[in-house]
Image (tube, rainbow, N blue to C red):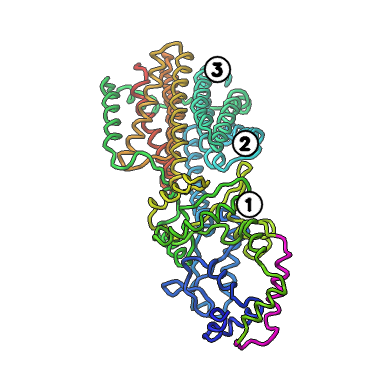
């Protein structure tokens, strides 16, 4: 007591200690406060946190999740309103950062881009249809199959999965865009002097094959095992089937009797003659194949992009600034977590206590600055009971205090609150995580503890990881000693997950391609004709891939989705160009429909390629390249000479 009380009372901070002294003569409260203080804390001036650059810091926690942009927007508005109401706010500047702010920023930027890109794309598509068919009624009719497929696809997905994943909404309507070609085929192939049903009957077998083939391709996403992609496949396949059915049985009933047969267009005959006059050397596809493989071989960047951070639409400067603020606040490392696993909470806390001495050694060796273990806040029940058993009874404690106060300037009875507190503590029940959650520090402990597969798991945060390799080895040594402890590298784990998903999708796509080839061969009953459909589609996909890689683009899962979509679009071109009718007018109708399909796809996805959002840009550029290559190669490899 002499060292812990008298010396401290003679210090400049005596006024802060006096309120604690009567109930805590050993000042254990300060020891706990020091134990709970992070390894790195911001500079404190007059009770306010400051960064090294002299900026006042404020940490705000919202009740809503950080990825809820609507709630985060409301929180930011409230924060800005409170700041604006402060005296002298005009002379200061409020800077907000963090995941919540980023979610609002990205949401607003994506919404803004989506609105103007959608507006331009819709207007351009409408103008294209008006120029192609010279009928306002076509604008409404072209939406009938897509709208039918989208509504039915969403309903089927909700029934099958009980909820609709975000990726389904984000990319499902994009993949369903293949269905916009179905009504275009009906409009362009309508013949003068025949009914809509008769005109449609001539192209329905190929259109049906295109629908089935696209569904086979999208089955690859279902086989991936990823819930979001499985929902995407389910939504798209159901949507395409319903859109095809609406095209076959509903659309003809709604089409007007008056129309213009596109085969009578003079410019279309000139275009057909021009395409027929283009040389088709046999070596061209093989040269394209060699060139594509060479580009893939010499591409400078890594083939796959496994780092999800590279796909974020948040500007690098804002991410760097967020890192600076986190460092100034002394926030823990967001990449590494120490994972403790036990049968229940009691064993988990006991495990935390056992590895605590090892953590101290890591800190002394400068491997890591700090590890926030759950036992830092709440000891195990065994430790609590052991400490409780050591508490003396009132008589023993009074005698010890009397002896300790000899020659000390403390008034008699000063430490009565301390004696009462110890006596009360001897009879208190031990603290459990559930009871501790009601305390001011309970939220911190609850954030660390979770349940998984009937077991208790703790996620201990780390601060200042200086040597990840040595830390990993040290944690592995704990595991060898029988402790259920592991080091979780969130970056490596996310990359490993991406690799696993990509491998599944890649394998499923290969199987889907084989099934697709078999379906086309069975439908044509001619392997050579099937080859003229599958070969241009496959080569075009390879060339699109090669151009991306040759431009230094590392591929992500979104590129695979986009390549599959482009292949689905390109399959239509090859199927219809391979169609042998011996009728020049029907060839003109085929060319007209294909040109409209290609033009609309290039318009929509070309606009997406200009987006500042990496995911949208990747999808737009990939599909636009794929559509261009599919059209060119289909006219070369699948077009019959007439």
Question: Nearest the camera: 390 or 105?
Answer: 390
Quarter placement of the C terminus:
top left
Q: Which mark is residue 120?
A: none
Q: State left or right for residue 95 relative to residue 295.
A: right
Q: Are the residues tagged 3 and 1 within 8 Å (C-beta)?
A: no
Count neighbours of disc 1 (C-alpha within 10 A) and say few if under 14, some if 14 to 19, many if 20 or more. some
Nearest-to-viewer mark from 2 and 1: 1
Nearest-to-viewer mark from 3 and 2: 2
Dot 2 or dot 1: first in sequence order is 2
Q: Residue furthest top?
A: 525
Quarter placement of the N terminus:
bottom right
Q: Is residue 424 magenta?
A: yes
Q: State left or right for residue 406 relative to residue 626.
A: right
Dot 3 or dot 2: first in sequence order is 2
Q: Is residue 180 visible?
A: no
Residue 94, position in %: x, y?
Answer: 50, 70
Nearest-to-viewer mark from 3 and 1: 1
Question: Nearest the camera: 77 or 463?
Answer: 463
Residue at point 38% right, 24% down?
269
Magenta part of the chain: 407-429
Residue 39, position in %: x, y?
Answer: 47, 66
Q: Which mark is residue 154?
A: 2
Residue at point 44% right, 75% down?
54
Q: Is residue 451 visible?
A: yes
Q: Is residue 597 magenta?
A: no
Q: Which residue is mark 1?
A: 346
Count neighbours of disc 2 (C-alpha within 10 A) and say few if under 14, some if 14 to 19, many if 20 or more. many
Q: Which residue is mark 3?
A: 201
Dot 3 or dot 1: first in sequence order is 3
- Residues at marks 3 and 1, CA–CA distance in whole angstroms: 72 Å
């Amino acid at each position: 007591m002499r060292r812990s009380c008298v010396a401290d009372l003679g210090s400049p901070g005596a006024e802060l200690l006096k309120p604690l002294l009567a109930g805590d003569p050993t000042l254990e409260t300060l020891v706990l406060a020091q134990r709970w203080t992070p390894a790195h804390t911001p500079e404190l001036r007059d009770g306010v946190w400051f960064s090294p650059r002299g900026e006042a810091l404020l940490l705000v926690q919202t009740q809503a999740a950080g990825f809820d942009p609507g709630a985060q927007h409301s929180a930011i508005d409230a924060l800005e309103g409170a700041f604006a109401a402060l005296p002298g706010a005009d002379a200061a500047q409020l800077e907000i950062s963090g995941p919540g702010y980023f979610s609002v920023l990205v949401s607003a930027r994506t919404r803004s881009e989506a609105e103007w890109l959608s507006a331009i794309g819709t207007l351009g598509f409408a103008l294209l249809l008006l120029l192609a068919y010279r009928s306002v009624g076509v604008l409404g009719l072209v939406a009938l199959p897509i709208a039918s497929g989208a509504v039915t696809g969403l309903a089927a997905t909700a029934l099958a999965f009980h909820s609709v994943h975000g990726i389904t909404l984000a990319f499902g309507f994009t993949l369903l865009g293949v269905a916009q070609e179905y009504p275009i085929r009906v409009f362009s192939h309508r013949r003068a002097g025949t009914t809509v049903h008769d005109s449609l009957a001539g192209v329905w077998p190929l259109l049906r094959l295109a629908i089935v083939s696209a569904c086979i391709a999208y089955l690859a996403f279902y086989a991936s095992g990823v819930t979001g992609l499985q929902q995407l496949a389910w939504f798209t396949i159901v949507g395409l089937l319903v859109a095809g059915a609406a095209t076959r049985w509903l659309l003809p009933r709604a089409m007007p009797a008056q129309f213009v047969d596109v085969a009578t267009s003079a410019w279309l005959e000139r275009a057909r003659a021009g395409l027929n006059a283009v040389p088709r050397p046999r070596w061209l596809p093989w040269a394209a194949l060699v060139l594509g493989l060479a580009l893939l071989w010499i591409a400078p960047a890594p083939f796959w992009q496994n780092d999800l951070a590279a796909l974020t639409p948040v500007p690098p400067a804002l991410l760097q600034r967020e890192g600076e603020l986190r460092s100034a606040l002394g926030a823990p490392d967001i990449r590494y977590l120490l994972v403790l696993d036990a049968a229940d909470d009691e064993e988990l806390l006991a495990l935390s206590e056992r590895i605590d001495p090892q953590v101290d050694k890591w800190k002394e060796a400068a491997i890591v600055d700090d590890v926030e273990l759950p036992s830092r806040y709440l000891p195990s029940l065994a430790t609590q009971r052991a400490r409780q058993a050591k508490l003396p009874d009132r008589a023993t404690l009074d005698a010890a205090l009397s002896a300790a106060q000899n020659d000390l300037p403390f008034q008699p009875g000063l430490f009565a609150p301390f004696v009462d507190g110890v006596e009360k503590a001897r009879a208190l029940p031990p603290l459990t995580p559930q009871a501790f959650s009601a305390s001011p520090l309970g939220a911190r402990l609850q954030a660390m503890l979770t349940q998984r597969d009937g077991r208790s798991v703790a996620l201990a945060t780390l601060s200042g990881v200086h040597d990840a390799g040595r830390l990993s080895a040290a944690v592995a040594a704990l595991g060898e000693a029988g402790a259920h402890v592991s080091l979780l590298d969130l970056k490596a784990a996310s990359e490993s997950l991406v690799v696993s998903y990509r491998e599944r999708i890649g394998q499923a796509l290969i199987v889907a391609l084989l099934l697709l080839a078999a379906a086309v061969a069975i439908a044509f009953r001619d392997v050579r004709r099937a080859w003229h459909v599958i070969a241009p589609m496959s080569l075009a996909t390879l060339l699109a891939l090669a151009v991306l890689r040759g431009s230094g683009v590392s591929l992500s899962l979104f590129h695979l989705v986009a390549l599959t979509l482009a292949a689905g679009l390109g399959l239509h071109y090859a199927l219809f160009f391979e169609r042998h009718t011996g009728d020049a007018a029907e060839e003109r109708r085929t060319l007209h429909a294909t040109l409209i399909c290609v033009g609309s796809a290039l318009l929509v996805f070309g606009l997406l390629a200009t987006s500042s959002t990496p995911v949208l840009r990747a999808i737009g550029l990939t599909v636009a390249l794929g559509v261009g290559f599919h059209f060119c190669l289909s006219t070369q490899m699948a077009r019959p000479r007439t």
